[in-house]
Image (tube, rainbow, N blue to C red):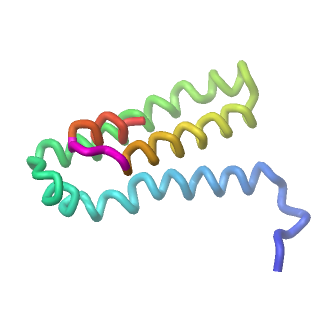
Amino acid sequence: MGLRPDIHPAVLATALATFVSFLGVGIVDPILPSIAHEMGASHFMVELLFTSYLLVMGLAMLFSGALATRIGSKKTMLLGLATVGVFAGACALASSVEALAVLRGF
């Protein structure tokens, strides 16, 4: 069973971006209490982790349209996915909740 040849690549790219966006909230949100416990973070810092992500995602949506107009939709999508991947890897290596809040914002 492979990919259907009649599915447009843009549909697959949109599905991938939607899945990555869900991962940003759907996977991390339930484990925030564990992160707080492991890193000794306050309730405020845990909320900051979630809020920083939502704030940056909202700002990214505002500017991605203009960027897509300048450099093209495909390049914008690839740049966005690469940025998310790099910062997700950096989040895995964060040693403090403050560093995690900054990295998670991107």
- Is 95 colored magenta in this rendering? yes
- For image coordinates 31% across by 37% down, the residue present is 52
- For image coordinates 54% across by 53% down, the residue present is 20
Image location (x, y in percent) of residue 66:
63, 22
Question: Can you tell which quarter of the image residue 63 is in?
Answer: top right
Taking depth in this image into account, of 40 and 7 the one nearest to the observer is 40
Left/right of residue 11 with respect to residue 7 in the rendered view: left
Quick check: 56 above or below 33?
above
Image location (x, y in percent) of residue 99:
27, 37
Question: Can you tell which quarter of the image residue 59 is in?
Answer: top left
Quick check: 70 above or below 91?
above
Image location (x, y in percent) of residue 12:
73, 56
Quick check: 9 above or below 81?
below
Image location (x, y in percent) of residue 11:
75, 54
- For image coordinates 67% across by 39% down, the residue present is 78
- Is 89 colored magenta in this rendering? no
Taking depth in this image into account, of 51 and 86 the one nearest to the observer is 86
Question: Can you tell which quarter of the image residue 57 is in?
Answer: top left
Left/right of residue 66 with respect to residue 98 in the rendered view: right
Q: How many marks?
A: 0
Q: Quadrant of the N terminus?
A: bottom right
Q: Magenta segment, principal secondary structure? A: loop
Region in magenta: 93-97
Q: Quadrant of the C terminus?
A: top left
